[in-house]
Image (cartoon, rainbow, N blue to C red):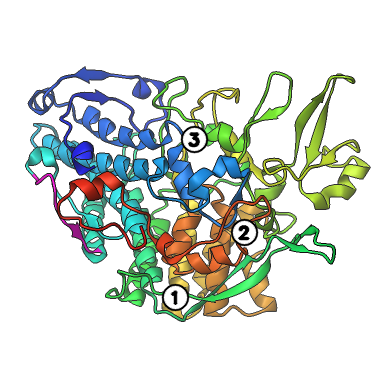
């Protein structure tokens, strides 16, 4: 597989920069142009864009969201829609292969294009910024790969620059050292969002700081010793009555686990890395490069694309077959020709919905509560279903947009949370590709990373950590963390659990939950607390082999330095 991933030469560059401006998203193709030609032409922007364009490959047919969302505790839908990946059959799954392949393509492009840009006769600050963006992409790619696959073939220069085609896997520690090195380079070289030359939508100096904080927190949590406790709200989705009938369990229960130390992270000093995370997150907060939007509605409005809360997002172009995606259709659905809702098969489980305060905008506005599911030919009218079941009183009284004729349905893709965030597009939801910008990193995460790190460094949350989290409480209209602590004082363990829960509420279906369960060493405990299958018969039972994804078979078969796959595969 490495040969297939890295052997290609620079033949075509497609310009798709991080800018939201249409002129910056226009396609510009260079066919069979050598690296020397591009150096002479000073085409640094095309080289940066060509590297970042590889991020779009995993979204072209929906592979990326499958691998980061399906293997989690709170995602559900029809069993057929979740396929082998959702059932834990990762080996030779297309999404797994593509995740591995496309991130290595990002790495190769980023490193080779940086090498070319370094030879250009351009202003030093322009050169530093371009190479900083590419270093960020390299770090981001390795960061995703190392968490899913463990030890990696670590290319510090591209094959096009003369690196060997095949190399052994490097230990996790070495991979992280390179990630941090690349991010420090990017942090120094890139423009700030406040610089006149910064282009909206590109990664920035602040993005490097944010990712550094996330990397440090990941190391801190993964290396934390076995036995430290953390709680999640989970549990079985149903029980059986005396007659053998399946009865839903409407509310999750508190499950407290002793975390495992993640394999490969044993040599790291957990508290030292958490201190680095705390300092780096606070540095970014104090800079003021990013900020929260005032409401969920404003956050997910079209006008906010690439705005002040979005640190790093996938850039898309409506109507372009390779630079657009089906994510909005897959999660929010679309209105079919007869007026009914089609697609939208992937929902958040009801146990996720029950985590929220009733006033929280992430469910009052953020969840679609009523939608048409059937057209009745005899009456010429649509039938609507409602969600959640506890809104039955509102339905009966016709409140909050419900009608007394609305029906409660437990269909796998009708009973669960469809999220409004996936409607942040400029084209109609009609079943075709849309220009949904996948949010890789948002400023909300920086606040929660700071609070998480502060809690671990100080043995409990400081007043500053409480202050940062309450910015989110205020925006989301949820109960303030200080008010919760006034009733039951926070401990290190309880606040740790609170932050983990806030992350799954804030970043639902944004591809973060699986990484969180893995880095905290509670992936197996959490998945298996569901009891084998969820309410829609999606298999959630997991084994130790699922802690790492299997390498693609071609990688093992082709690279002479890799004799075996990851354990269990």
Q: Residues within 10 Å of mark 1 (few under 14, many from 20)?
A: many
- Can residue 299 be seen from the camera position used here? no
> Which range of residues does the magenta coloring cover?
163-171
SS for dot 3: loop
Which residue in the protein does label 2 denote? 473
Extreme-front residue of the structure: 243
Which quadrant is home to the N terminus? top left
SS for dot 2: helix
Among numbered discs 1 and 3, the one appearing first in the sequence: 3
Q: Residues within 10 Å of mark 2 (few under 14, many from 20)?
A: some
Which residue in the protein does label 1 denote? 456
Q: Nearer the viewer, residue 526 or 461?
A: 526
Residue 233, by quadrant, is bottom right
- Can residue 113 be seen from the camera position used here? yes
- Residue sitting at x 37%, y 24%: 25
Q: Is residue 337 left or right of residue 43?
A: right
- Residue sitting at x 79%, y 38%: 385
Q: How far is mark 2 from mark 3, CA to CA? A: 22 Å
Main structural element of the magenta stretch: helix, strand or loop?
loop
Q: Is residue 522 left or right of residue 253?
A: left
Which residue in the protein does label 3 denote? 305
| x then y, percent, for residue 262 | 37, 70
């Amino acid at each position: 597989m490495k040969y297939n991933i890295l052997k290609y030469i620079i033949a075509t560059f497609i310009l798709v920069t991080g800018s939201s401006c249409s002129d910056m998203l226009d396609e510009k193709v260079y066919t069979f142009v050598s690296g020397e030609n591009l150096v002479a032409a000073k085409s640094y922007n095309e080289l940066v864009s060509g590297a970042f364009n590889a991020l779009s490959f995993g979204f072209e047919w929906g592979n990326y969201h499958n691998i980061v969302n399906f293997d989690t505790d709170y995602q559900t839908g029809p069993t057929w829609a979740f396929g082998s990946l959702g059932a834990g059959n990762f080996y030779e799954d297309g999404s797994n292969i593509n995740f591995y392949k496309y991130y290595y393509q990002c790495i190769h492009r980023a490193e080779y294009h940086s090498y070319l840009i370094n030879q250009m006769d351009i202003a030093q600050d322009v050169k530093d910024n371009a190479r900083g963006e590419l270093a960020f992409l390299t770090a981001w790619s390795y960061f995703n790969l190392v968490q899913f696959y463990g030890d990696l073939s670590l290319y510090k220069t591209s094959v096009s620059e003369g690196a060997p085609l095949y190399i052994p896997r490097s230990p996790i520690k070495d991979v992280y050292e390179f990630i941090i090195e690349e991010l420090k380079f990017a942090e120094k070289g890139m423009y700030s969002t406040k610089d006149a030359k910064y282009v909206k939508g590109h990664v920035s100096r602040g993005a490097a700081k944010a990712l550094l904080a996330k990397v440090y927190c990941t190391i801190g949590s993964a290396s934390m010793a076995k036995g430290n406790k953390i709680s999640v709200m989970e549990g079985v989705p149903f029980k059986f009555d005396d007659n053998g009938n399946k009865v839903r369990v409407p509310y999750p229960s508190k499950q407290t686990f002793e975390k495992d130390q993640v394999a490969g992270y044993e040599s790291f000093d957990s508290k030292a890395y958490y201190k680095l995370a705390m300092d780096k997150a606070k540095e970014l907060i104090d800079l003021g490069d990013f900020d929260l939007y005032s409401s969920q509605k404003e956050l997910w409005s079209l006008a906010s694309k690439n705005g002040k809360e979005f640190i790093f997002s996938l850039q898309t172009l409506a109507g372009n077959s390779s630079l657009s995606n089906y994510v909005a259709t897959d999660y929010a659905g679309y209105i079919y020709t007869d007026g009914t809702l089609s697609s939208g098969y992937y929902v958040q489980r009801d146990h996720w919905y029950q985590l929220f305060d009733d006033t929280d905008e992430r469910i009052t506005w953020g969840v679609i509560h009523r939608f048409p599911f059937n057209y009745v030919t005899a009456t010429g009218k649509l039938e609507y279903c409602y969600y959640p079941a506890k809104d039955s009183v509102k339905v009966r009284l016709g409140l909050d947009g419900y009608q007394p004729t609305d029906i409660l349905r437990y269909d796998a893709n009708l009973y669960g949370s469809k999220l409004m965030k996936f409607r942040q597009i400029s084209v109609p939801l009609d079943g075709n590709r849309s220009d949904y910008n996948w949010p890789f990193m948002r400023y909300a995460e920086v606040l929660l990373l700071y609070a998480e790190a502060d809690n671990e460094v100080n043995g409990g949350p400081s007043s500053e950590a409480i202050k940062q989290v309450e910015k989110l409480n205020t925006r989301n209209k949820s109960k303030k963390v200080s008010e919760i602590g006034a009733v039951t004082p926070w401990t290190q363990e309880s606040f740790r659990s609170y932050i983990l829960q806030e992350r799954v509420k804030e970043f639902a279906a944004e591809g973060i939950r699986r990484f969180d369960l893995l880095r905290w060493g509670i992936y197996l405990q959490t998945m298996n607390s569901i009891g084998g299958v969820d309410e829609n018969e999606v298999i959630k039972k997991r084994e130790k082999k699922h802690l790492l994804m299997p390498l693609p078979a071609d990688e093992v078969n082709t690279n002479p330095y890799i004799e075996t796959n990851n354990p269990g595969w």
